[in-house]
Image: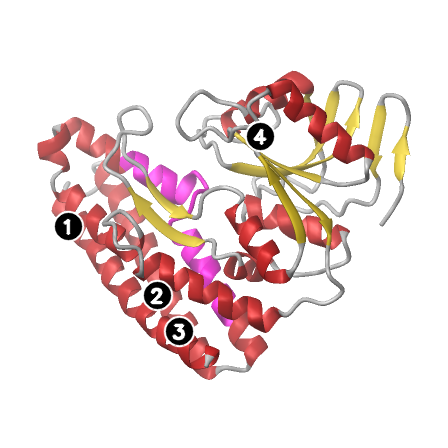
């Protein structure tokens, strides 16, 4: 670890290894771990941290639209990965905005990179400002006068250069008035162990993901939630009327495939985790399951492509057909996670 370059108005953690990544939370965690001397892939972080999930609630969260959620809620991958790897990781939320900013400065002075969560549309440096997503993760690793030095891992940036944001803009992005406000969320690592038990982390991560997808009794979560979304879409026209029903569909494509919150991308990421875990454990059965997960990701991608064609009227609109495609996704995920659960049980004996 390097030393701070510190003056009265400037704090820079000189050797913070910022690089763009696949996903904002896992990319941020990967870079933070590398700063502490550990090189772990984003796919492994995602799987051990149980980032794979699904939720759908019958509420109009954004401009009258419902929203499917394909990932765990913000900072939960960090929380679970840290716990399973024996990392001294901390998560804080705030009510007082100025106090939340003072907390960043205090950690920077201790040479600690600080992970933050924000509303992406309020970040002046972000390349896609038209997006609305309140769970975007990035790392602050310096401050220069009234500006913070930011490592944002989003792949849409042209290179690995650091970004800058003013005190006021950063504070504004960390607090919103909506239900899904980041509430000034902050996460950081104080110390790490000399050795990680990767096998134990893989098994615990998969076991927890199986529970998230199969074991929650409420109809909005996991595989049940995917079946619920399928049935819900079939009734969108009755619930919302023709015009708003298709606005919901279009918005859900944007969220799942373009807005960075999951969809097929997270399914491909989990397939890669299962493949990497299978190679690490030298396990043929798990490798076969990883191939099935890739087929599931393909199915979600086909749904998005078909829905997009229909929304743009390049194909005849058929909302029941789209709902049936999601029903197929639910069946495939149910089958896979039942197999994965059985595999995990045998390995934990």
- Residue at label 3? 289
On screen, residue 223 above or below 322: below
Q: How far apart in space, not on screen, are marks 1 and 3 (Cα)?
A: 27 Å
Mark 2: few/some/many CA within 10 Å (<14, 14-19, 20+): some
Of the pair 130 and 232, the residue shown nearer to us: 232
Q: Secondary structure at mark 4?
A: loop
Membership of 260 in magenta stretch: yes
- Nearer to us: label 1 or label 3: 3
Magenta stretch in the rendered image: 250-275
Q: Which mark is residue 295?
A: 2
Q: How far apart in space, not on screen, are marks 3 and 4 (Cα)?
A: 36 Å
On screen, residue 224 above or below 147: below
- Residue at label 1? 321
Of the pair 315 and 21, the residue shown nearer to us: 21
Q: How far apart in space, not on screen, are marks 1 and 4 (Cα)?
A: 36 Å
Q: Is residue 157 visible?
A: no
Q: Secondary structure at mark 3?
A: helix
In the figure, residue 247 lies in which quadrant? top left
- Nearer to us: label 3 or label 4: 3
Q: Position of residue 108 (x, y in %)?
A: 78, 34
Q: Position of residue 67 (x, y in %)?
A: 31, 37
Of the pair 201 and 32, the residue shown nearer to us: 201
Residue depicted at 43% across the width and 38% down the height? 259
On screen, residue 331 above or below 323: below
Q: Is residue 68 visible?
A: yes
Whichever of labels 3 and 4 marks the residue nearer the N terminus, that label is 4
- 196 vs 94, left or right, is right
Whichever of labels 2 and 4 marks the residue nearer the N terminus, that label is 4
Q: Secondary structure at mark 2?
A: helix
């Amino acid at each position: 670890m390097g030393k701070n370059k510190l003056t009265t108005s400037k704090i820079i953690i000189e050797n913070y290894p910022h690089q763009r990544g696949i996903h904002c939370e896992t990319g941020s965690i990967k870079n933070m771990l590398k700063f502490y001397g550990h090189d772990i892939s984003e796919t492994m972080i995602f799987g051990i941290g149980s980032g794979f999930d699904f939720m759908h609630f019958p509420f109009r969260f954004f401009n009258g639209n419902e929203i499917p959620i394909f990932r765990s809620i913000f900072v939960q991958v960090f929380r679970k990965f840290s716990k399973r790897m024996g990392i001294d990781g901390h998560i804080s939320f705030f009510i007082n905005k100025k106090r939340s900013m003072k907390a960043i400065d205090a950690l920077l002075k201790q040479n600690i990179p600080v992970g933050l969560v924000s509303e992406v549309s309020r970040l002046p440096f972000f390349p896609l400002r038209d997006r609305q997503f309140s769970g975007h993760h990035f790392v602050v690793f310096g401050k220069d006068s009234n500006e913070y030095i930011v490592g944002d891992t989003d792949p849409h940036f042209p290179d690995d250069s650091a970004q800058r944001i003013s005190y006021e803009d950063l504070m504004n992005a960390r607090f919103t008035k909506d239900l899904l406000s980041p509430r000034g969320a902050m996460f950081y690592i104080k110390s790490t162990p000399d050795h990680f038990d990767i096998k134990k982390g893989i098994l615990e991560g998969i076991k927890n993901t199986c529970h998230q997808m199969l074991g929650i009794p409420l109809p909005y979560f996991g595989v049940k939630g995917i079946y619920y979304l399928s049935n819900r879409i079939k009734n969108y026209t009755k619930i919302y009327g023709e015009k708003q029903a298709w606005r919901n569909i279009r918005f859900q494509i944007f969220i799942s495939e373009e807005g960075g919150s999951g969809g097929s991308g997270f399914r491909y990421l989990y397939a890669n985790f299962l493949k990497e875990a299978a190679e690490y454990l030298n396990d043929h059965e798990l490798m076969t399951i990883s191939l099935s997960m890739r087929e599931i990701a393909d199915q979600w991608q086909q749904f998005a492509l078909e829905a997009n064609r229909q929304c743009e009227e390049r194909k005849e609109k058929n909302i029941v057909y789209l709902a049936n495609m999601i029903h197929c996704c639910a069946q495939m995920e149910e089958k896979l996670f039942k197999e994965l659960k059985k595999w995990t049980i045998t390995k934990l004996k």
